[in-house]
Amino acid sequence: MGPWRRLPTYFPNISLHMLPLMEQELEAVKKTGWLRKVAFRTTPNVSKLEIKAFLERVYGMSVEKVNTLNYEGKKKRRKYGMVQRPDWKKAYVYFKPQVGDSVEDNESR
């Protein structure tokens, strides 16, 4: 071994599920090849920094910022009582624009 050693990178057990894209976003992907903002669904205990580090280190994406929203699970009445679906967090991830692309053209709402 050399004089230095790379430290291992540990990630928590993160489950990120990309939410379905709207028709306008699909058209933007077909036109330009990428999106500026994408929404993910994850567990409520995951922080913004963990989401950003996970996407940058595992998938090699360049993330500009992350905005999050917490949602309570719906309460449903069943014949054996009330049941609550699990709580979840929605994360909006903004990617850095690629070199040569203008932000205004690729911004999807």
Image (cartoon, rainbow, N blue to C red):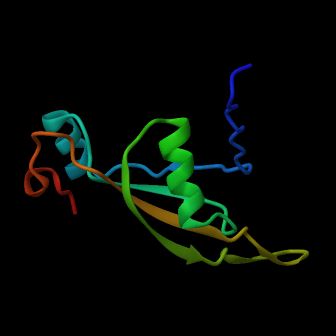
Tell me which corner region of the image, top left, top right, bottom left or bottom right, holds residue 107.
bottom left
Q: Is residue 33 left or right of residue 90?
A: left
Q: Which residue appears at 64% of the width and 78% of the height?
A: 72
Number of numbered callouts drawn: 0
Pick out the residue farthest to the front. Answer: 3
- From this view, report whether residue 107 is shown above or below residue 30: below
Tell me which corner region of the image, top left, top right, bottom left or bottom right, holds residue 51.
bottom right
Q: Quadrant of the N terminus?
A: top right
- Which of 61/90 is in front? 61
Q: Is residue 32 left or right of residue 44?
A: left
Image coordinates for residue 35, horizontal then vertical, percent: 26, 46
Q: Which residue appears at 9% of the width and 50% of the height?
A: 102
- Which of 107/87 is in front? 107
- From this view, report whether residue 11 is shown above or below residue 46: above
Image coordinates for residue 60, horizontal then vertical, percent: 45, 36
- From this view, report whether residue 11 is shown above or below residue 83: above
Pick out the residue farthest to the top. Answer: 1
- Which of 66/57 is in front? 57
Image coordinates for residue 31, horizontal then vertical, percent: 13, 36
Image coordinates for residue 34, horizontal then vertical, percent: 25, 40
Q: Is residue 56 left or right of residue 3?
A: left
Pick out the residue farthest to the right. Answer: 80
Q: Which residue appears at 54% of the width and 51% of the height?
A: 53
Q: Quadrant of the C terminus?
A: bottom left
